[in-house]
Image (cartoon, rainbow, N blue to C red):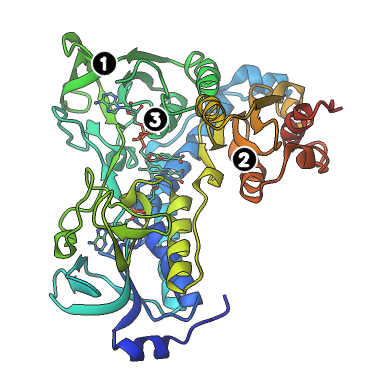
Amino acid sequence: FVPKISSTKLCAEAEYDFDVAIIGCGVGGHGAALHARGQGLKTAVFSGRDVGGTCVNRGCVPSKALLAASGRVRDMRDADHLESLGISVDGEVSYDRQAVADHAKNLANTVKGNLENSLIGLSVDVIEDRGILAGPNKIKADKSGKIYTAKNIILAPGSVPFVPPGVTVDEKTVYTSDGALNLDFVPEWVAIIGSGYIGLEFSDVYTALGSEVTFIEALPMLMPTFDREIAKQAERMLIRPRPIDYRLGVFASEVTPGEPGKKPCTIKMINANTKEHVETIEVDAVMVATGRVPNTKDMGLDSMNIETNRGFVAVDEKMRVKTSADGEIIDNLYCIGDANGVMMLAHAASAQGISAVENICGREHVVNHEAVPAACFTHPEIAMVGLTEEQAVERAEKEGWTLGKSQGNFRANSKALAEGEGAGIAKVLFNKETEKIVGVHIIGIHAADLIQECANAVEQGTTVRELSMMVHTHPTLCEVLDEAFKGAVGMSSH
Ligand SMILES: Cc1cc2nc3c(=O)[nH]c(=O)nc-3n(C[C@H](O)[C@H](O)[C@H](O)COP(=O)(O)OP(=O)(O)OC[C@H]3O[C@@H](n4cnc5c(N)ncnc54)[C@H](O)[C@@H]3O)c2cc1C
Ligand SMILES: NC(=O)c1ccc[n+]([C@@H]2O[C@H](COP(=O)([O-])OP(=O)(O)OC[C@H]3O[C@@H](n4cnc5c(N)ncnc54)[C@H](O)[C@@H]3O)[C@@H](O)[C@H]2O)c1
């Protein structure tokens, strides 16, 4: 980064301790801190002794480590798949549960250390206390009580697991993702409440390690937030061939912890509409994956008369805090990441942090959230950017344009077939008049890496015609997208 603003000048002018102070050092706060220093701003971050936050310590990073290790176990136990490649494994494939758990923990610690070093390397002031907003330009350090002043404040306190009423969590037999990531034991039968990202990723881990899974989902379909066609494909590829069953349209109304190996956990279920009791089951463990809530309690929002909506802080498109959803913008106060609820993803939090700093520096910036990709790291992966087909149909109708749809297939892709992984599709949704992409959904091997080309295209406004003329390496999985882009403009791919 090239420093653009002299920090001494900015601080001296208003006699603040810092140009920017950030409350919370998850990936959002960390991204903002690094960018602020890159711009030459005197920067502090209140870390609450949790550098890396959810993503690094209790989220993306350790969960991907568990997915990587369990994925290998699944592959090595898949005798048919191995045989099709000419391989056999003599003897049983086993794993050491504690060593798998340690892999996740060690990785989280390494990444956390890297983040801490990057803050030190760039001379960000890391204040290990929690930060409490204490009025305009003021933050109180929770334990020491010391008041710090900053010209600009960025709130980045993130989120915590949501536990529905009636569910007792002991983080041992009934746990959220926080407890699940410790992998204290591998239950024979685990019920997962909620079939969103976390539930789906953990069903992948558990079934690979030998558990049976029962999903309990409040809505009448599995994976309700996904594009419907992709959710159906996911059911075919990730649910039906595995020891997974499910209950739909039910709430887990009462969940009681058990004792590992001794006493089962009990789950009472009620119909989501009628609220009548439908079933009670006993399982070895229960994972609660019913979404996350903002971590904005007790951080002094009242000191600036900020009204939250279920804890979410309202922001405008430049990440400036508003007093309420339709309230006024508060000067020099920003909120980024999970706490504003715009898009609960690690890279979105960090992009919003960078964007807030750009606005602080006087360069107007808005994150285009429709160009922010997302991925679910199951085997195979699911990835998406932009609108689902259902949302695109609605948008096209409302705005009066024609929706185009084109598909590429993994079964026709040489690289996928070489891997023996020919299942999956890539679906490209586009505006037929402008030929611009409005959404892409991929399920198939390495979908999470493939989606980036599409996210860049949405951000840049690249048309399917332009994409269809761009040369994709052979033989690669990217050719699945090449097939879809060419199909969109009536060209056939080889
Ligand atoms: C199991 C799991 C897997 C996930 N996997 C992915 C994934 O693969 N990809 C992806 O994009 N996203 C993933 N996510 C979501 C991702 O972790 C979050 O979107 C991301 O962490 C949000 O970043 P954040 O900086 O807003 O908040 P957080 O990461 O929650 O960080 C906020 C930090 O602020 C601290 N804090 C709170 N209040 C204060 C205070 N008053 N003073 C000081 N510090 C404070 C908190 O302790 C925390 O350290 C996953 C989440 C979970 C739970
Ligand atoms: N790979 C990734 O990017 C990734 C991975 C994990 C988590 N995350 C993020 O973490 C956040 C939380 O993930 P999540 O999976 O917990 O939330 P989610 O919102 O994706 O899914 C929650 C699911 O639980 C269901 N549900 C809610 N209350 C229920 C109840 N009482 N009984 C039964 N079902 C109920 C919902 O209908 C929904 O299907 C998400 O916003 C996601 O973006 C991302």
Amino acid type for the residue under numbered disc 2: Ile
Q: Return the x and y of residue 257 as percentages of the image width and height.
A: 16, 27
Q: Are marks 1 and 3 in contact (CB under 8 Å)?
A: no
Q: Among all residues in the image, which is located at the extreme right?
A: 494
Q: Among all residues in the image, which is located at the extreme front?
A: 400
Tell me which numbered mark, 1 or 3, is placed earlier along the sequence: 3
Q: CA distance from mark 1 to mark 2?
A: 33 Å
* Residue on which disc 1 sits: 250
Label 2 crowd bin: few (<14), some (14–19), many (20+), radius 10 Å: many
Front residue of 147 and 198: 147
Disc 3 under 8 Å from ligand 2? The reply is: yes
Front residue of 328 and 211: 328
Front residue of 314 and 225: 314
Q: Return the x and y of residue 88 as percentages of the image width and height.
A: 66, 23
Q: Secondary structure at mark 2?
A: helix
Q: CA distance from mark 3 to mark 2?
A: 19 Å
Is 67 rendered above or below residue 131?
above
Q: Are marks 3 and 2 in contact (CB under 8 Å)?
A: no
Which numbered circle lies on residue 196?
Answer: 3
Disc 1 under 8 Å from ligand 2? The reply is: yes
Which numbered circle lies on residue 451?
Answer: 2
State which image quarter holds ligand 2.
Answer: top left
Quadrant of the snapshot with the C terminus: top right
Q: Return the x and y of residue 418 as percentages of the image width and height.
A: 76, 28
At 83% across and 43% down in the image, what residue appears? 471
At 51% across and 29% down in the image, what residue appears? 398
